[in-house]
Amino acid sequence: MATSAINIAVENLFKTAWGSRTTVKYDNIDFVIPAVAWVGLEVWDGKSQKASLGSGAQLRRSTGTVFVNIYTPLRKGSKAARDLADYVLPIFRDVQVSGITFEEPDVRRVGEQYFSINGVQSTTQWYQLVVSIPYFHDVVV
């Protein structure tokens, strides 16, 4: 499965399930940081390796991680970010789509963030959580 196909499948799954809950920043797309909560979706390719023995057709397993970065205004508590994380979890937890199997998500606190997007400094300071979802897909070659 091509990495672009994985990316499209992940983005489509997320778009459909997330709806208009918040604005979403997709990889390598211009984005204007809103003044309210928002999320960023990233698909990171991982390792690919042979997963079978013997001659003939071989099973190759490729892995990766989906990251959903959650940003909420700073100094407003963590509840809003954690509520959004709770919406992310069932979107991917033990789901299979387009030959991709998503595993158990993990939520991590990053905390205070100050940054720029597309060279424009954010005027809002953010509190960040990251939901990471490992995935794998198999291909017979």
Image (cartoon, rainbow, N blue to C red):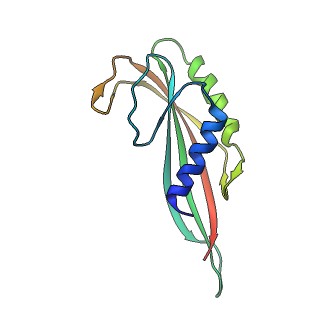
Q: Is residue 139 above or below residue 108?
A: below
Task: Point out the residue furthest to the bottom here.
Answer: 55
Residue 60 sits in which quadrant?
A: bottom right
Q: Is residue 35 left or right of residue 14?
A: left
- In the image, 98 versus 49, the foreground residue is 98
Measured as percent of width and height from the top left, residue 36 is found at 48, 17
Q: Residue at x 60, y 17 (%)?
A: 79
Q: Position of residue 100 (x, y in %)?
A: 65, 56
Residue 5: x %, y % from top left? 55, 56
Taking the view exactly as shown, the residue that stands out farthest to the top is 76
Number of marks in picture? 0
**Residue at horizontal 55%, vertical 18%?**
78
Above or below residue 125? Residue 52 is below
Instruction: Residue at 66%, 29% (x, y): give it.
Output: 87
Q: Quadrant of residue 115?
A: top left
Q: Quadrant of the C terminus?
A: bottom right
Asked whether, in this view, residue 74 is left or right of residue 139, the answer is left
Q: Nearer the viewer, residue 12 or 108?
A: 12
Residue 108 versus residue 53 in the image, above or below: above
Quadrant where the N terminus is found in the figure: bottom right
Residue 58, percent from left and from top: 63, 79
